[in-house]
Amino acid sequence: MPVVNNPYRRAPRPAVAMVAADSAAAASINLQMGPQSQKRLTLNERTHQLQSNSHRKKLKAGDQQTLFGDRAFDPNKDCAKCKARLGERDLHRGHHPLCWNNRRTKGVISAAALESIQEEKRLKTHFSAPLADKDKFSSRHTTKEAQEAFFFHNN
Ligand SMILES: [Zn+2]
């Protein structure tokens, strides 16, 4: 079996030199930063961690968490109408804007999403309506080429 000589092969580094290089790179960070600022960084991290936990309400069992750690909207707790319906009462009041039983917003309050819901409704009525007589069997937009292709080219 012929042995292929690799012209790009590097000479292997001794293990002791590799470890020394790695620890020097790690130590260079700590050499530039004094103990005072290292303590300050740790203190900042700890403070922010405490803040993030203290400023929001704690989640209870069954609560859904949002992306930012807050409690997600729950209609049975946050919507007065849905909450009343749980107790088999009826409140003469609209659903909360975030409630997905709200017919107007469907729980979505971004303007773009509302627009798309309205457009969807408009298209649904447009396509479910039957064609008007003025739209049927009209050859007003038919070109001469299209007529020829249809009537004479098929033979
Ligand atoms: Zn509701």
Image: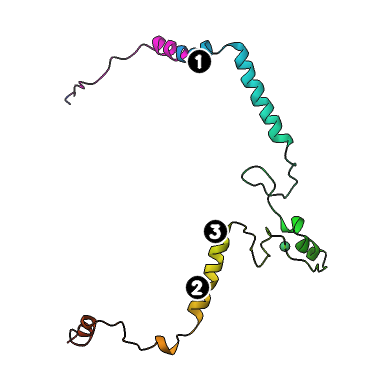
Q: Is mark 1 on a helix, strand or loop?
A: helix
User: Of residues 133 and 45, which is closer to you in this image?
Assistant: 133
Q: Which amino acid does label 2 sit on?
A: Leu
Residue drawn at x 34%, y 13% is 13
* Mark positioned earlier in the residue sequence (1 or 3): 1
Q: Compared with residue 68, is residue 85 higher up or lower down, i.e. above or below?
A: below
Report the Cα–Cα distance between label 1 and label 3: 48 Å
Q: Is mark 2 on a helix, strand or loop?
A: helix
Report the Cα–Cα distance between label 3 and label 2: 16 Å
Q: How crowded is mark 3: few (under 14 residues within 10 Å), some or many (20 or more)?
A: few
| Disc 3: which residue | 112
Image coords of residue 68 (percent x, y): 63, 43
- In-image side of 107 versus 85 (left or right): left
Is the CB–ligand 1 distance for label 2 below 8 Å?
Answer: no
Q: Is mark 3 on a helix, strand or loop?
A: helix
* Mark positioned earlier in the residue sequence (3 or 2): 3
Residue drawn at x 43%, y 10% is 20
Q: Does the magenta stretch include residue 22?
A: yes
Image coords of residue 141 (percent x, y): 31, 82
User: Of residues 34 and 141, which is closer to you in this image?
Assistant: 141
Image coords of residue 138 (percent x, y): 34, 87
| Disc 1: which residue | 29
Total of numbered circles in the picture?
Answer: 3
Is the CB–ligand 1 distance for label 1 below 8 Å?
Answer: no
- In-image side of 18 versus 151 (left or right): right
Quarter of the picture containing the N terminus is top left
Q: Residue 123 — which label? A: 2
Residue drawn at x 50%, y 12% is 27
